[in-house]
Image (tube, rainbow, N blue to C red):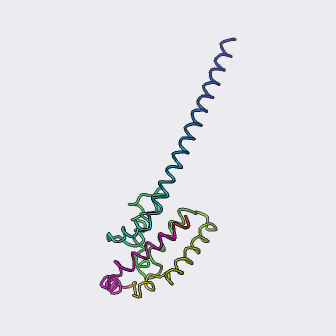
């Protein structure tokens, strides 16, 4: 066998070995990926309660949801917290609860960027949240005008941020867990 033919056979053999090694590594990665998915499932099951507890540590409702869910989509909790800051208190207008709007952001991360995939998920989320709580709006959920400083102070003095809101945050997380 001439030297060129021998080199070609060695190159093919090395390529075959490399392919086999890559296949084994990928398969091992899939196995650990499945184990990782099981660990992620355990983590996912705890996210609604983690979001509730996070809210109680003086964060806002939208931050509590987004900071607990965004890391699964490659967004740091710090960036998620900054992004979600303005959505609490129904975006300071008493409209959609911040936990609800943060859930929309999570659904966008999970199913976006195509609206035809995201909008049905948002509609399903809204339907379930309304079935549980009757409303989506922060002011309606709390029975206080959350668009004013007076309303915010009243909600605080009535303890709603310690009693009602944590339940809404956890509920939003539970609904998300069923959807993502």
Is residue 6 in the magenta section? no
| Position above or below: 88 against 158 | above
Q: Residue drawn 59% across and 68% down? A: 118
| Position above or below: 144 against 62 | below
Residues in magenta, as a range = 148-176
* Relative horizontal placement of residue 96, taking residue 9 as reference (left or right): left
| Position above or below: 64 against 161 | above
Image quadrant occupied by the C terminus: bottom right
- Please state the horizontal and vertical placement of residue 6, each as a whole percent of the image: 65, 16
Q: Residue drawn 44% across and 72% down? A: 170
Tag count: 0
- Label the magenta part by its dominant secondary structure: helix
Q: Residue drawn 39% across and 75% down? A: 166
Is residue 156 in the magenta section? yes
* Relative horizontal placement of residue 179, taking residue 150 as reference (left or right): right
Report which quarter residue 65 is drawn in.
bottom left
- Please state the horizontal and vertical placement of residue 124, each as a whole percent of the image: 58, 74
- Please state the horizontal and vertical placement of residue 66, each as a whole percent of the image: 44, 66
- Please state the horizontal and vertical placement of residue 130, each as a whole percent of the image: 53, 81
Report which quarter residue 18 is drawn in.
top right
Image quadrant occupied by the N terminus: top right
| Position above or below: 9 against 92 | above
Front-most of residues 147 and 100: 100
């Amino acid at each position: 066998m001439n030297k060129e033919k021998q080199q070609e056979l060695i190159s093919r053999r090395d390529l075959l070995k490399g392919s086999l090694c890559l296949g084994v590594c990928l398969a091992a990665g899939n196995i650990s990926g499945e184990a990782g998915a099981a660990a992620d499932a355990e983590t996912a099951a705890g996210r609604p309660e983690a979001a509730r507890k996070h809210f109680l540590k003086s964060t806002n409702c939208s931050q509590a949801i987004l900071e607990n869910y965004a890391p699964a989509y490659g967004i740091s909790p710090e960036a998620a917290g900054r992004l979600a800051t303005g959505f609490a208190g129904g975006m300071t207008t008493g409209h959609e609860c911040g936990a609800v709007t943060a859930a929309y952001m999570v659904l966008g991360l999970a199913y976006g960027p195509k609206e035809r995939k995201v909008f049905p998920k948002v509609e399903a989320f809204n339907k379930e949240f309304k079935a549980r709580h009757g409303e989506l709006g922060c002011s309606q959920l709390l029975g206080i005008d959350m668009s004013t400083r007076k309303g915010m102070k009243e909600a605080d003095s009535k303890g709603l941020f310690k009693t009602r809101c944590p339940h809404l945050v956890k509920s939003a997380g539970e609904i998300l867990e069923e959807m993502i």
